[in-house]
Amino acid sequence: MKLEELRFGTELLKRGFASMQKGGVIMDVINAEQAKIAEEAGAVAVMALERVPADIRKAGGVARMADPEKVTGIIDAVSIPVMGKVRIGHFVEAQVLEALGVDMIDESEVLTPADEQYHIDKKKFTVPFVCGARDLGEALRRIHEGAAMIRTKGEAGTGNVVEAVRHMRAIMGSIRALKGMNRQEMIDYAREIEAPAELVIECSERGRLPVVNFSAGGIATPSDAAMMMQLGADGVFVGSGIFKSSNPQMMARAIVEAVNHYDDAKVIARVSRGLGDAMPGLDVHTLKEDQVLQYRGR
Amino acid sequence: MSTHSKKIRCCNTVGVKIGVLALQGNVSEHIGAFERALKCMEREDQSSVFPIKQPAELQGCDALAIPGGESTTISRLIDKNQLHEPIRKFHGGIFATCAGMVLVATCVDNPRVHPIGLIDMTVNRNAFGRQRESFEADLVMDCITGGPFHAIFIRAPVGTEVGKGVNVLARIDRGIVAVEYGKHMALAFHPELGSDTRLHELFLKKNGI
């Protein structure tokens, strides 16, 4: 086998990587020590961050890509995949994370957007991307730009699952509604939701998004995670929910088991016992409009 | 890509039952690939492919697939679900891909993986590097006819050594990427991600299906 005959960074490799994460929990971590706890607990990957979303909210100001030293420290600490966040539209932050060897890039509304017009042209990269979405149109626009994975946005850093539920129901409901449409109606619907018609038709044929769809933004307990799986998520991202809880080791393990047995209430009941306090939550309705992260990017 | 099962019963023949270990990873793709393989072999009417999570469900299977995913996670869940011994003692063949190959080996380079030891081989995880080093390549394999197999390697492992009786089916410069041992097969790549079912069919034939 000659090296020049190998193909890197293809759509199949990007979507295939995302597919390997299915049924798993991806955990936000801010240092090597947390990354090791996440790996030990059974996380399928970690998201390397400067701060978890709850602290980004508190800190205010401009939130950017993490310090490369921190990212490298986390990469060296664990053998599972490491993901990293970049600002929406900030293609140079993405180039930097790719150069560092990050396995997947999250073009994330949790950081301050760098471009209010364009998202990153993700097809130019070898490394796969995950992007947030609140509805089917947004998800398909991101996939059209080259996202290999979608995560419903929810409302990060709140510990409140209500927005995650809203977004997952919106996407799953829209896909179910496609079943009753003929081709003409689907093309019309695609125009309405500002999505490419061929991707709408593909969703209808598959009965699901063409890429893996995880849930994110507000998952704080094993029950939250299992509910998102029952609503149709392929897996979950847990941001502040683990390392802002009173016992991160136990919470991390419990959420991994709850996702594995998401349809078995007895297991969820068992793993939920004596976990201590979940992260303190925020009522989403008390947030001012500029504090609502899900409105960033569309 | 949600997990699903297909059961069609026929009155005169005994169906084959293929379980896919559904703890984490590429489960529904393996179910789809086995269903396509059975169709190519014209055996789909007698057979079923379904996800399994519990030791009791193993009893009803003629063969088992251990899919790709994150090997440290799957290993932890195998232990949590008390599947380690039942899989080690499983009577049928095992089709293990990527993380699956790591799990069925006897020796793994990472202490977080608790290998089942079904195939006497030493495996290194992430042997090619990070995701940016994941690749597609045409693999020449003598065990199949009809040209090279288009193989998809994602953060793939390689075998560095195999024991007696383990037959190497494919090797590249970094090491061993496909083996067979008795009824078992282990592959470092992902045949379930493409449309080519020749390796799934080969496994089914080895298991008398």
Image (cartoon, helix red, strand yellow):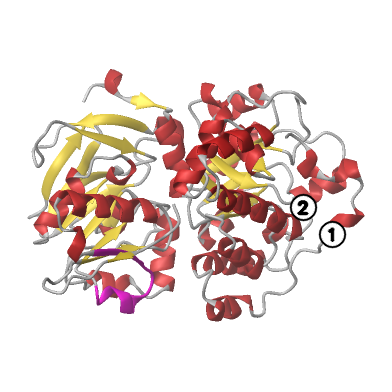
Mark 2: amino acid: Gly
Relative side of A298 to A197, left or right: right
What residue appears at the point 63 percent right and 68 percent down from the top-left corner? A222
Locate residue A9, reporting x and y percent: 43, 28
Q: Is residue B51 magenta?
A: yes
Q: Quadrant of the C terminus of chain B?
A: bottom left
Could you say which is closer to the camera, residue A218 or residue B159?
A218
- Secondary structure, mark 2, is loop
Residue at the location (65% across, 56% down)?
A169
Q: Is residue B131 left or right of residue B209?
A: right
Q: Chain of mark 1?
A: A
Using the numbered discs, state the Cα–Cα distance from disc 2 to disc 1 in whole angstroms.
8 Å
Q: Nearer the viewer, residue A45 or A200?
A: A200
| Numbered label attached to residue A282 | 1
Mark 2: few, some, or many residues within 10 Å (few <14, many ≥20)?
A: many
* A168 is higher (above) or lower (below) than A64: below
Please report the bounds of the magenta region as a residue range.
Answer: B48-60
- Amino acid carrying label 1: it is Leu
Task: Give the residue pinned by disc 2.
Answer: A157
